Amino acid sequence: MRALDLKLVRDLRHIWIQSLAIALVLACGVMVLILSSGTQRSLSETREAYYERNRFADVFASLTRAPRSLLDDIARIDGVARVEGRVVFTAMVNLEGMTEPASARVISLPQTGRAILNVPEVRQGRLPEPGHASEVAISEPFAQANGLEPGDHFRAVLNGRLKELVVTGLVLSPEYIYTIGAGAMMPDDRHFGLIWMGESAAAAATDLEGAFNDLSLTLSRGADERPVIAAIDRILAPYGGTGAFGRDRQASNVFIDGELKQLGAMATVLPPIFLIVSAFLVNMVLGRLVALDRAQIGLFKAVGYSTRAIAVHYLKMTIGIGIAGVAIGWLSGWWLGHELTKIYADFFRFPWLIYRPGAGSLVISGVLGIGCVVLGALRAVLSTVRLAPTVAMQPPAPPVFQRGWLDGVSLALRLRQTTMMILRSIVRWPGRAAVTLFGVSGSVAVLVASFFTFDAIDIIMLEIFEHANRQDATLTLTSAVNARAEQDALALPGVLSAEGIFAVPVRLINGTRSRLVSLQGRPPEARLAVLLDEKGETVAMPSSGIVLAEGLADWLDVGAGDPLRVEVLSPPRETWDIPVSAVIRQSLGQDAFIDRDAFFRLARQAPQVNMIHLAIDRNALTELEARVQETPAIAGFTLWTNVQKEFETTLNESLVTMTIIFAALGMLITIGVVYNAARIQLAERAHELASLRVLGFRRGEVGYVLVAEQMLLTLIAIPAGWLGGYALCALMAQGFSTEVVSIPLVVTQRTFAAAALIVIFTALTSALLVRRRLDRIDIVSALKQKE
Amino acid sequence: MMSETQSSRVEVLKAVGITKVYRSGTVAVDALKGVDLALYEREIVALLGASGSGKSTLLNILGGLDLPTDGRLFYRGRELSALSDAGLTEFRRRHVGFVFQFYNLVPSLTARENVALVTEIAEDAMTPEEALDRVGLASRMDHFPAELSGGEQQRVAIARAIAKRPDILLCDEPTGALDSKTGVTVLEAIVEVNRTLGTTTALITHNVAIRRIADRVIYMADGEIARAEENADRLAPAEVSW
């Protein structure tokens, strides 16, 4: 081995802890990029592949009843590739040992036994045999939540008739990646499931022999879905069609789109911060490391090594560190990304997982990682190798300080000389201070943004479960009935008050903009489910006009007072022009609301309801649940405590995991920045600090010079970090707001305080770690080195 | 000047059987091999000897910068060799001033501030201005070390060392990095301080000529005191040259 290479190996061994620290900081930046983009990309690709392989439909529609012959007319629509008509209905399910009511959506399988579209993925067992009326396959999450396996029996109320069913298999469906029951807001696998049964059995149960009430279809390549949807609506109108819609309105797909959008926001907002900070840090540390080798560089030149050979030597050393950092980042990012993707895949109920972090992120992070290492080293090597050997072998000239505004400050504040040393050092090397400021404020910003997630969740939870929805339970009825049903509900055991809702699918149209939404007719003076304004205050339902959720109003480009066309897609099937009476804030979902009586005045009918919100006495819950199960008119029973629990679980599993990872990495930035800055200080000022010890300064007093400088910079960095954090929160609120969830930009003082305190604590710990090294310095030998 | 007899003079520092062994792996180097020495009030002692004779090691131990491997050290009857690191720090802080060959000034502080560094933590210190005036630097107080000549920097170091009115001033080759003319001004400052403040001063030098400004000269060789002699006719620094 050549002498220079031997030196390289020994040097690396000598400074391995510092090299590792640099490599780890770099690895952090690389890891975050791989992790975030890898997770998001893998989930998107997995979903795409799942949709493709299981032929997820492009357009969906529900209707009351149409003959199967109509499917041929639909298949002839220009742009339609494949069509499937199914029988779909809701049934109450009686599970052994479960007192509370559960319901399921029953979906028919064609006579052939093989679905054409939205093909269920068999996870265990098999699909029901055609002709076996009692055989069913059920959704895997529902089976797991209720301990059902192939071969088990359970009972369901099919169209008022109690029937014994046998489970043949557990399946997943691309159509129900998220399974949300009627009237629910979140998946509740224990109380809502999916049942696939043979078409003849399903049709028999609902008197739909030779007919269908649910339509799915795929489009031929390149076909535009809008004319197809319009054509279907025309064809289905006489058959009770409630409006066809594309994937962009399909509940499960909308939900997962939102989740992927949130992940995408995470993947674009935060990683650049980590990468930039680690690039700065690596650049700074390597620069100092090479600068400390100045005398040796002079020696190499003196004995005849070329500038090039010396530069290459140091580049080899730093590239080695860079490669190690990038490799660690790639591996840990790959591994952590895989774990995180698995968590998400489980959560999304994907049947399998394609984990494929993009080559793009590997290349980008690799190039950036090695690049910033090389630049950091080159800067220092070049500035040193340009010196004449004799000059380089001398220690660098002492830094020149100048009097300035600081002297006035010092005099006015009667600052101690050790404090002056700190201030002059900051003013003399502003670049170095800037790196610390930048790093620490970045760290604060990342923490603020991370904790903001919890603030947002708190506010949303409060709005949904405390302010907007005060009901304890919601009954979903099998069909719309006269509003007198409210009185019947009041007669149920334990019911304290009841509010009947009429929910109906409508298409809202403003010029060329239109959207399919659920319009909720709420009773005048509703007290259980109420509307909130932008400040979160309760607002009364206007007695006329339509009320829109903010996001929906934005999409339709209307405000209070603007006229809006409302196409009611189920009976009474009329089109009205109604003014928008108010725009409200809705954290979860984007719905339209109307006074129930006003709605039925427009429809010239007696008021009806198809959902009833209840306030109940918890002590009578078991009794109420038993009665609900016996009542054929009730298709679903939603307990809001369950909804809240599911909501929390959903958020905890997805967002919070990522948030914790980012918060931890945010703290790592502070450690990396402050520890390295203090180490560099110590290396460069060991002599000066030893002098102070000689003069009789106590360890703590000398440590002050080292620690206080880092802490002063940390304190200055915090307000900047708050500002940056707020900006990040704004980006995230925007990025995280989906059609399902709207994130308010409210950052609490708690979040700002927590971010600051954690960073102060982390910085102090890092600086004190270096102070311990200072305590161990041998004064005599430190003084022997020439200044 | 040497009117009193040694026995009637007051001992400030007393070393008894001091040894110092430096270990590095399996190699042990005996830097001091049983040194007995006393420094008395108001005297100037010059320590002479070749490189590696143990002068600096002895001075560092006398000043509480280092602990002896064996032997005992007393400051006005109080045992120093038994003190902890914190105790030695207090000893240096209250009673000892150091001057080194390479000044050891804090580059980011002006001359005045370098002195204030010490006066801020000492009891009964003189003002930085007074200390700098004593070494003839009243006009250069607001200059940073990088703006001062070597001789001026060393005089700042002396001002910093004596500003707290120390009992003992320990100088390790204070003129080693200076030319003869500048060295003389530095020595003048040291002698002046000794005369006006009565500070006991020990001064390491390679320079045989400088010994003539001292009351006593101690010759060291191979970790031991080879011999000591009294200077009957002390010279003023201006009379010395090299």
Image: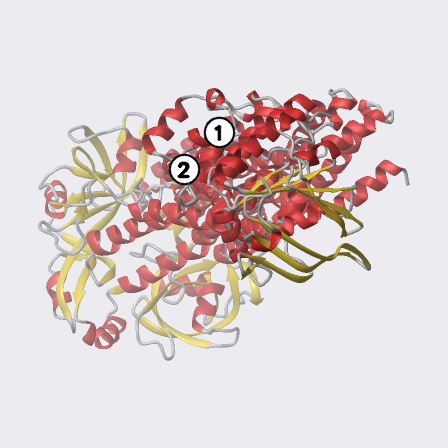
On the image, the x and y values in percent for residue A411 come to: 35, 29
Give the residue displayed 22% in from the left and 77% down from the top: A623
Horizontal side of B216 relative to A275 (left or right) equals right
Residue A279 makes an appearance in the image: yes
Give the residue displayed 25% in from the left and 53% down from the top: A462
On the image, the x and y values in percent for residue A314 come to: 76, 33
Residue A515, above or below A537: above
Residue A492, above or below B233: below
Residue in the foreground of this view, choosing between A410 and A658: A410
SS at badge 2: loop
Horizontal side of A313 relative to A708 (left or right) equals right
On the image, the x and y values in percent for residue B149 come to: 60, 21
Label 1, residues with CA under 10 Å away: few <14, some 14-19, many ≥20: many
Instruction: Check residue A497 in the rendering and tell me which mark sits there, or answer none.
Output: none
> Which of the 4 image quarters holds residue B154?
top right
Tag 1: amino acid = Arg
| Chain of the residue under the numbered disc 1 shown in the image | B
Marks counted in the figure total 2
| Chain of the residue under the numbered disc 2 shown in the image | A
Mark 1 and 2 residues: CB-CB less than 8 Å, in contact? no
Residue that badge 2 annotates: A416
SS at badge 1: helix
On the image, the x and y values in percent for residue B47 come to: 70, 43
Quarter of the picture holding the C terminus of chain A: top right
Give the residue displayed 36% in from the left and 28% down from the top: A409
Residue that badge 1 annotates: B134
Q: Nearer the viewer, mark 1 or mark 2?
A: 1
Residue A703 makes an appearance in the image: no
Residue in the foreground of this view, choosing between A690 and A91: A690
